[in-house]
Image (spheres, grey):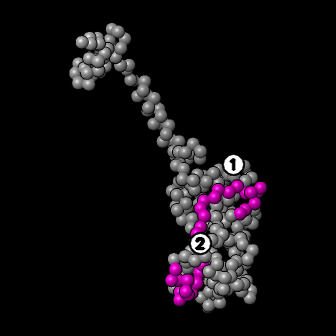
Amino acid sequence: MTGSEETLSFRLAYVPGVTPTKWVRIWNERLPDVPLELVATPPAEACDVLRDGGADAGFVRLPVDRTYFSAIPLYTETTVVVVPKDHLFTAADEVSTEDLADEVVLHPLDDTLGWERPPGQPAFERPATTADAIELVAAGIGLLVVPQSLARLYHRKDLKYRTLTDAPQSQVALAWPEERTTDQVEDFIGIVRGRTVNSTRGRTQPEAKAKAQPQAKSAGKSGARQKPAATGKSGKPAGKGPKGPRSGSGAGAAKGARRGKPRRRS
């Protein structure tokens, strides 16, 4: 697919924990004629959705295959441990992985932190999803380490979370198949990067071009009517003597005095 080929809509995938609301709002303001479709995607399936054309671009968790995908890292999340609300850890602001040594730590199959084995004691079996693991934490089966956005997403009144200081962190990025970098993908990249609609690094919309052209013409006409400043006989601008614009008094006069003949030493 080339950059000039357009679809009737723009499909944006996003994994749990990512909130694309701000970027969607800007897209709808700038391109109201191109609907943006959100595609909620499990973390493990996000890259397959993009490969198969199920979405044009997506907010994913790194790493991705950089030989196939282009990716723009956006932010790195704080890692937290989710515990029952009456757990001892709730008395502290943060904990370390060493503090988990005697705790059962759940390791869901859709883990987003990428470690082979979390700290602490392994559970009897791995939960299928993070949502399942949250239920097990609430039941007192074990604890769970996740990016903070997932702890917020699955928040429950009977659970709390605390920052885990020395754990791996999850990085969120905008990714898309490099060979399918369409004009619409470029438009969305510009939005995510905070570019204005007239940015030279992004596509300028037809409406913006139409507004800019009359202004340029108007500026050109007004520039043509401007007359050169009047000059005196010496060819210098009128009203300015050899000592500058205020040669007769004040600081100008003082400077002029210093440029006169030197005083004799007694």
* Amino acid at pointer 1: Gly
Gap in angstroms between the C-alphas marked 1 and 2:
44 Å
Q: Is residue 74 magenta?
A: yes
Q: Position of residue 25 (x, y in %)?
A: 52, 61
* Residue occupying the far front of the picture: 266
Q: At x 61% / y 54%, what residue is drawn? A: 189
Residue 74 position in % (x across, y down):
60, 59
Q: Nearer the viewer, residue 240 or 179?
A: 240
- 10 Å crowding of disc 2: few (<14), some (14-19), many (20+): some
Tell me residue 163's x, y (percent): 56, 74
Q: Residues within 10 Å of mark 1 (few under 14, many from 20)?
A: few
Q: Which residue is mark 2?
A: 165
> Is 252 displayed left or right of 66 in the figure?
left
Q: Which region shows up in magenta?
A: 63-92
Tell me the quarter of the picture where residue 42 sits: bottom right
Rendered residue at 65%/85% (across/down): 103
Q: Mark 1 — residue?
A: 3
Look at the picture and state if 106 lies above or below 42: below
- Residue 250 visible within the image: yes
Residue nearer the viewer, 104 or 160:
104
- Residue 189 versus residue 93 in the image, above or below: above
- The answer to whether residue 81 is left or right of residue 208 is right
Quadrant of residue 133 within the rendered picture: bottom right
Percent from the top left, x then y, of residue 241? 29, 15
**Which is nearer the N-term, disc 1 or disc 2?**
1
Give the mark toward the camera: 1 or 2.
2
